[in-house]
Amino acid sequence: MNKLKLILISSTIILFNFNLYAESIKIITKVDNEIITNIDIENEKQYLLFLNPKLEKLNEKRIKDIAKNSLIKEIIKRNELKKFYSFDNKDDLLEKIEKRLLTNKKINNKSELIKILENKNLDYKNIKMKFLIEALWNRLIYNKYSNNLRVDENSLRKKLINQFKIKNKKYEYNLSEILFTEKINESIDQTLYKLNKSISEIGFENTANIFSISSTSKNGGLIGWVNELQISEKIETNIKNLKKNEISVPMKIGAGYLLIKLNSKREFNQKINIDSQLRELVNKETNRQLNTFSVIFFKRIRMNTEINEL
Protein backbone atom coordinates (compact mmCIF):
# COMPACT_ATOMS: atom_id res chain seq x y z
CA MET A 1 0.00 0.00 0.00
CA ASN A 2 2.82 2.38 0.92
CA LYS A 3 4.60 1.53 -2.34
CA LEU A 4 1.45 2.28 -4.35
CA LYS A 5 1.01 5.55 -2.50
CA LEU A 6 4.62 6.52 -3.22
CA ILE A 7 4.14 5.76 -6.95
CA LEU A 8 0.97 7.88 -7.05
CA ILE A 9 2.70 10.79 -5.31
CA SER A 10 5.71 10.57 -7.66
CA SER A 11 3.45 10.45 -10.71
CA THR A 12 1.55 13.50 -9.45
CA ILE A 13 4.80 15.45 -8.97
CA ILE A 14 6.06 14.51 -12.45
CA LEU A 15 2.72 15.47 -14.03
CA PHE A 16 2.69 18.77 -12.12
CA ASN A 17 6.23 19.63 -13.25
CA PHE A 18 5.39 18.66 -16.83
CA ASN A 19 2.34 20.93 -16.81
CA LEU A 20 4.43 23.79 -15.45
CA TYR A 21 6.99 23.24 -18.21
CA ALA A 22 4.28 22.99 -20.86
CA GLU A 23 2.71 26.23 -19.66
CA SER A 24 6.09 27.96 -19.95
CA ILE A 25 6.37 27.02 -23.65
CA LYS A 26 4.62 29.33 -26.08
CA ILE A 27 4.39 28.98 -29.84
CA ILE A 28 5.48 32.30 -31.33
CA THR A 29 5.65 31.66 -35.08
CA LYS A 30 4.82 28.90 -37.53
CA VAL A 31 6.93 28.45 -40.68
CA ASP A 32 5.01 26.12 -43.01
CA ASN A 33 4.49 23.13 -40.69
CA GLU A 34 7.28 23.93 -38.24
CA ILE A 35 6.83 25.90 -35.05
CA ILE A 36 9.15 28.36 -33.31
CA THR A 37 8.68 28.59 -29.54
CA ASN A 38 9.82 31.12 -26.97
CA ILE A 39 12.43 28.53 -25.88
CA ASP A 40 13.81 28.34 -29.43
CA ILE A 41 14.03 32.13 -29.56
CA GLU A 42 15.84 32.29 -26.21
CA ASN A 43 18.41 29.71 -27.39
CA GLU A 44 18.91 31.58 -30.66
CA LYS A 45 19.30 34.83 -28.72
CA GLN A 46 22.14 33.31 -26.67
CA TYR A 47 23.79 32.05 -29.86
CA LEU A 48 23.60 35.47 -31.53
CA LEU A 49 24.96 37.13 -28.38
CA PHE A 50 27.89 34.72 -28.55
CA LEU A 51 28.56 35.78 -32.14
CA ASN A 52 28.00 39.49 -31.47
CA PRO A 53 28.15 40.47 -27.75
CA LYS A 54 27.25 44.08 -28.67
CA LEU A 55 23.66 42.93 -29.10
CA GLU A 56 23.39 43.21 -25.32
CA LYS A 57 23.04 46.97 -25.84
CA LEU A 58 19.64 46.42 -27.45
CA ASN A 59 16.43 46.04 -25.50
CA GLU A 60 15.08 42.54 -24.94
CA LYS A 61 12.27 42.82 -27.48
CA ARG A 62 14.62 43.93 -30.26
CA ILE A 63 17.04 41.06 -29.57
CA LYS A 64 14.21 38.53 -29.59
CA ASP A 65 12.89 39.90 -32.89
CA ILE A 66 16.36 39.46 -34.40
CA ALA A 67 16.52 35.92 -33.00
CA LYS A 68 13.07 35.06 -34.36
CA ASN A 69 13.92 36.33 -37.85
CA SER A 70 17.20 34.43 -37.74
CA LEU A 71 15.33 31.19 -36.96
CA ILE A 72 12.77 31.83 -39.71
CA LYS A 73 15.59 32.27 -42.20
CA GLU A 74 17.32 29.12 -40.96
CA ILE A 75 14.16 26.99 -41.23
CA ILE A 76 13.45 28.21 -44.77
CA LYS A 77 17.01 27.39 -45.83
CA ARG A 78 16.99 23.97 -44.13
CA ASN A 79 13.69 22.96 -45.73
CA GLU A 80 15.00 23.92 -49.16
CA LEU A 81 18.29 22.10 -48.59
CA LYS A 82 16.48 18.86 -47.68
CA LYS A 83 15.35 18.65 -51.31
CA PHE A 84 18.97 18.33 -52.46
CA TYR A 85 21.24 17.08 -49.67
CA SER A 86 21.63 14.65 -46.83
CA PHE A 87 22.83 16.22 -43.59
CA ASP A 88 24.98 13.21 -42.69
CA ASN A 89 28.77 12.84 -43.01
CA LYS A 90 29.61 16.47 -43.75
CA ASP A 91 32.60 16.83 -41.42
CA ASP A 92 34.73 18.36 -44.20
CA LEU A 93 32.33 21.28 -44.54
CA LEU A 94 31.99 21.76 -40.79
CA GLU A 95 35.74 21.83 -40.24
CA LYS A 96 36.23 24.87 -42.50
CA ILE A 97 33.48 26.86 -40.78
CA GLU A 98 34.71 25.92 -37.31
CA LYS A 99 38.23 27.07 -38.16
CA ARG A 100 36.93 30.43 -39.36
CA LEU A 101 34.85 30.84 -36.19
CA LEU A 102 37.81 29.94 -33.95
CA THR A 103 39.93 32.55 -35.73
CA ASN A 104 37.28 35.28 -35.57
CA LYS A 105 36.52 34.65 -31.88
CA LYS A 106 40.21 34.12 -30.98
CA ILE A 107 39.49 30.68 -29.53
CA ASN A 108 42.39 28.22 -29.42
CA ASN A 109 40.68 24.94 -30.33
CA LYS A 110 37.39 23.06 -30.62
CA SER A 111 37.49 21.87 -27.00
CA GLU A 112 37.68 25.45 -25.79
CA LEU A 113 34.80 26.38 -28.12
CA ILE A 114 32.62 23.58 -26.74
CA LYS A 115 33.38 24.67 -23.17
CA ILE A 116 32.45 28.29 -23.94
CA LEU A 117 29.19 27.17 -25.55
CA GLU A 118 28.33 24.95 -22.58
CA ASN A 119 28.88 27.86 -20.20
CA LYS A 120 26.30 29.77 -22.26
CA ASN A 121 23.88 26.80 -22.14
CA LEU A 122 24.33 26.22 -25.86
CA ASP A 123 24.35 22.71 -27.31
CA TYR A 124 27.35 22.15 -29.58
CA LYS A 125 25.38 19.68 -31.73
CA ASN A 126 22.76 22.35 -32.46
CA ILE A 127 25.48 24.86 -33.31
CA LYS A 128 27.08 22.33 -35.67
CA MET A 129 23.74 22.03 -37.46
CA LYS A 130 23.64 25.80 -37.90
CA PHE A 131 27.15 25.68 -39.40
CA LEU A 132 26.12 22.84 -41.70
CA ILE A 133 23.01 24.65 -42.96
CA GLU A 134 25.11 27.68 -43.93
CA ALA A 135 27.77 25.51 -45.59
CA LEU A 136 25.25 23.48 -47.60
CA TRP A 137 23.37 26.64 -48.53
CA ASN A 138 26.58 28.09 -49.97
CA ARG A 139 27.14 24.85 -51.88
CA LEU A 140 23.60 24.94 -53.26
CA ILE A 141 23.97 28.54 -54.43
CA TYR A 142 27.28 27.72 -56.11
CA ASN A 143 25.82 24.67 -57.87
CA LYS A 144 22.81 26.67 -59.09
CA TYR A 145 24.62 29.82 -60.22
CA SER A 146 28.25 28.97 -60.96
CA ASN A 147 27.55 29.19 -64.70
CA ASN A 148 26.36 32.77 -64.20
CA LEU A 149 29.59 33.95 -62.55
CA ARG A 150 31.59 36.54 -64.46
CA VAL A 151 35.13 36.98 -63.11
CA ASP A 152 37.77 38.44 -65.44
CA GLU A 153 41.04 37.00 -64.08
CA ASN A 154 43.23 38.77 -66.63
CA SER A 155 41.81 42.14 -65.64
CA LEU A 156 42.26 41.34 -61.95
CA ARG A 157 45.86 40.26 -62.52
CA LYS A 158 46.67 43.53 -64.34
CA LYS A 159 45.10 45.46 -61.49
CA LEU A 160 47.24 43.65 -58.91
CA ILE A 161 50.46 44.17 -60.87
CA ASN A 162 49.74 47.88 -61.39
CA GLN A 163 48.92 48.41 -57.72
CA PHE A 164 52.01 46.53 -56.66
CA LYS A 165 54.22 48.70 -58.86
CA ILE A 166 52.63 52.04 -57.95
CA LYS A 167 52.39 51.84 -54.18
CA ASN A 168 55.39 52.13 -51.89
CA LYS A 169 53.32 51.62 -48.74
CA LYS A 170 50.67 48.95 -48.60
CA TYR A 171 47.88 48.69 -46.07
CA GLU A 172 45.39 46.19 -44.77
CA TYR A 173 42.04 47.08 -43.28
CA ASN A 174 39.83 45.55 -40.63
CA LEU A 175 36.32 46.09 -41.98
CA SER A 176 32.66 45.57 -41.18
CA GLU A 177 29.80 45.84 -43.67
CA ILE A 178 26.10 46.40 -44.08
CA LEU A 179 24.70 45.19 -47.39
CA PHE A 180 21.16 46.29 -48.19
CA THR A 181 18.79 46.57 -51.14
CA GLU A 182 16.14 49.04 -52.21
CA LYS A 183 12.65 48.36 -50.93
CA ILE A 184 9.52 48.62 -53.01
CA ASN A 185 7.67 50.86 -50.56
CA GLU A 186 10.48 53.35 -49.75
CA SER A 187 13.17 55.35 -51.51
CA ILE A 188 16.88 54.73 -51.06
CA ASP A 189 17.10 58.01 -49.11
CA GLN A 190 14.44 56.78 -46.69
CA THR A 191 16.30 53.49 -46.23
CA LEU A 192 19.56 55.32 -45.61
CA TYR A 193 17.87 57.59 -43.09
CA LYS A 194 16.65 54.52 -41.15
CA LEU A 195 20.11 52.94 -41.28
CA ASN A 196 21.93 56.08 -40.15
CA LYS A 197 19.41 56.63 -37.36
CA SER A 198 19.85 53.01 -36.23
CA ILE A 199 23.66 53.26 -36.36
CA SER A 200 23.51 56.42 -34.28
CA GLU A 201 21.23 54.82 -31.68
CA ILE A 202 22.49 51.23 -31.39
CA GLY A 203 25.78 51.08 -33.29
CA PHE A 204 26.98 49.72 -36.62
CA GLU A 205 27.27 46.07 -35.52
CA ASN A 206 23.75 45.85 -34.13
CA THR A 207 22.37 47.63 -37.19
CA ALA A 208 24.12 45.02 -39.35
CA ASN A 209 22.40 42.27 -37.35
CA ILE A 210 19.02 43.83 -38.06
CA PHE A 211 19.26 45.19 -41.60
CA SER A 212 22.17 43.59 -43.48
CA ILE A 213 21.37 40.87 -46.00
CA SER A 214 24.99 39.71 -46.14
CA SER A 215 26.09 36.40 -44.62
CA THR A 216 28.23 38.48 -42.22
CA SER A 217 25.15 39.93 -40.53
CA LYS A 218 25.12 37.40 -37.67
CA ASN A 219 28.64 38.49 -36.77
CA GLY A 220 27.67 42.14 -36.65
CA GLY A 221 28.82 42.62 -40.25
CA LEU A 222 32.44 41.75 -39.45
CA ILE A 223 34.57 41.01 -42.53
CA GLY A 224 37.91 41.08 -40.70
CA TRP A 225 41.36 41.92 -42.04
CA VAL A 226 41.65 42.42 -45.80
CA ASN A 227 44.70 43.79 -47.61
CA GLU A 228 44.19 46.55 -50.14
CA LEU A 229 45.11 44.34 -53.08
CA GLN A 230 41.95 42.32 -52.46
CA ILE A 231 39.60 45.28 -52.35
CA SER A 232 37.86 46.59 -55.42
CA GLU A 233 38.95 49.99 -56.66
CA LYS A 234 35.52 51.42 -55.85
CA ILE A 235 35.62 50.25 -52.22
CA GLU A 236 39.25 51.27 -51.69
CA THR A 237 38.54 54.77 -53.02
CA ASN A 238 35.76 55.12 -50.44
CA ILE A 239 37.64 53.76 -47.41
CA LYS A 240 41.29 54.76 -47.84
CA ASN A 241 40.79 58.18 -46.21
CA LEU A 242 38.46 57.00 -43.47
CA LYS A 243 39.54 57.31 -39.86
CA LYS A 244 39.07 54.53 -37.33
CA ASN A 245 35.35 53.77 -36.72
CA GLU A 246 34.22 56.01 -39.59
CA ILE A 247 31.70 54.74 -42.13
CA SER A 248 31.85 55.05 -45.90
CA VAL A 249 29.25 56.61 -48.12
CA PRO A 250 26.82 54.05 -49.58
CA MET A 251 28.26 52.26 -52.63
CA LYS A 252 26.21 50.61 -55.37
CA ILE A 253 27.42 47.01 -55.50
CA GLY A 254 25.65 44.62 -57.85
CA ALA A 255 21.97 44.48 -56.91
CA GLY A 256 22.45 46.24 -53.58
CA TYR A 257 24.20 48.98 -51.65
CA LEU A 258 27.14 48.67 -49.29
CA LEU A 259 28.21 50.58 -46.20
CA ILE A 260 31.73 49.87 -44.91
CA LYS A 261 33.00 50.66 -41.43
CA LEU A 262 36.76 50.95 -40.86
CA ASN A 263 37.55 49.21 -37.58
CA SER A 264 41.32 49.50 -37.90
CA LYS A 265 44.11 50.01 -40.43
CA ARG A 266 47.78 49.00 -40.48
CA GLU A 267 50.73 48.94 -42.83
CA PHE A 268 52.07 45.59 -43.95
CA ASN A 269 55.43 44.83 -45.48
CA GLN A 270 55.39 41.10 -46.20
CA LYS A 271 56.44 39.92 -49.63
CA ILE A 272 53.55 39.84 -52.09
CA ASN A 273 52.90 36.76 -54.19
CA ILE A 274 50.84 37.91 -57.19
CA ASP A 275 49.41 34.44 -57.91
CA SER A 276 48.35 33.97 -54.30
CA GLN A 277 46.79 37.43 -54.17
CA LEU A 278 45.02 36.77 -57.45
CA ARG A 279 43.46 33.59 -56.08
CA GLU A 280 42.18 35.47 -53.05
CA LEU A 281 40.86 38.30 -55.19
CA VAL A 282 39.06 35.87 -57.50
CA ASN A 283 37.55 34.13 -54.46
CA LYS A 284 36.32 37.42 -53.02
CA GLU A 285 34.75 38.52 -56.31
CA THR A 286 33.18 35.07 -56.74
CA ASN A 287 31.76 35.19 -53.21
CA ARG A 288 30.42 38.70 -53.79
CA GLN A 289 28.50 37.57 -56.88
CA LEU A 290 27.30 34.40 -55.17
CA ASN A 291 26.04 36.45 -52.23
CA THR A 292 23.91 38.48 -54.65
CA PHE A 293 22.47 35.28 -56.17
CA SER A 294 21.87 33.93 -52.65
CA VAL A 295 19.81 36.98 -51.67
CA ILE A 296 17.69 36.77 -54.83
CA PHE A 297 17.11 33.02 -54.45
CA PHE A 298 16.21 33.27 -50.76
CA LYS A 299 13.69 36.05 -51.41
CA ARG A 300 12.00 33.86 -53.99
CA ILE A 301 11.75 30.91 -51.57
CA ARG A 302 10.49 33.08 -48.73
CA MET A 303 7.68 34.42 -50.92
CA ASN A 304 6.46 30.84 -51.30
CA THR A 305 6.75 30.04 -47.58
CA GLU A 306 3.77 30.36 -45.24
CA ILE A 307 4.80 32.29 -42.14
CA ASN A 308 2.21 32.87 -39.43
CA GLU A 309 2.72 34.91 -36.26
CA LEU A 310 0.78 33.31 -33.41
Image (cartoon, rainbow, N blue to C red):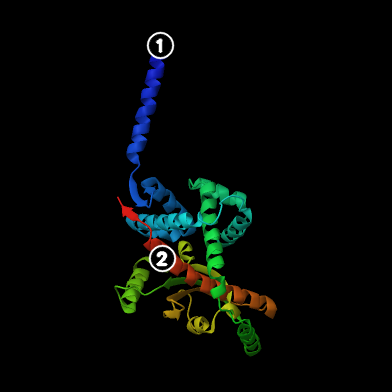
Mark 1 secondary-structure assignment: helix
Relative to 129, is 303 on the left or the right? left
Residue occupied by mark 1: 2
Q: Relative to 138, does residue 116 appear above or below in the rendering?
A: above
Q: Is residue 273 visible?
A: no
Numbered label tally: 2
- Nearest to the eye among marks 2 and 1: give it: 2
Q: Residue at x 45, y 65 (%)?
A: 217
Residue in front for this viewpoint, 294 or 84? 84
CA gap, disc 2 and disc 1: 64 Å
Relative to 106, is 21 on the left or the right? left
Q: Relative to 84, does residue 189 appear above or below in the rendering?
A: below
Q: Is residue 66 visible?
A: yes
The residue under label 1 is which amino acid type?
Answer: Asn
Q: Residue at x 63, y 88 (%)?
A: 162
Q: Residue at x 46, y 78 (%)?
A: 254
Mark 2 secondary-structure assignment: helix
Q: Quadrant where the N terminus lies?
A: top left
Dot 2 or dot 1: first in sequence order is 1
Residue occupied by mark 2: 300
Residue 279: mark in rendering: none
Residue 232 drawn at (x, y percent): 54, 81
State which quadrant residue 266 falls in: bottom right
Residue 143 drawn at (x, y percent): 56, 66
Q: Are marks 2 and 1 in contact (CB under 8 Å)?
A: no
Relative to 108, is 264 on the left or the right? left
- Are there few (<14), some (14-19), or many (20+) residues within 10 Å of tag 2? few
State which quadrant residue 26 falls in: top left
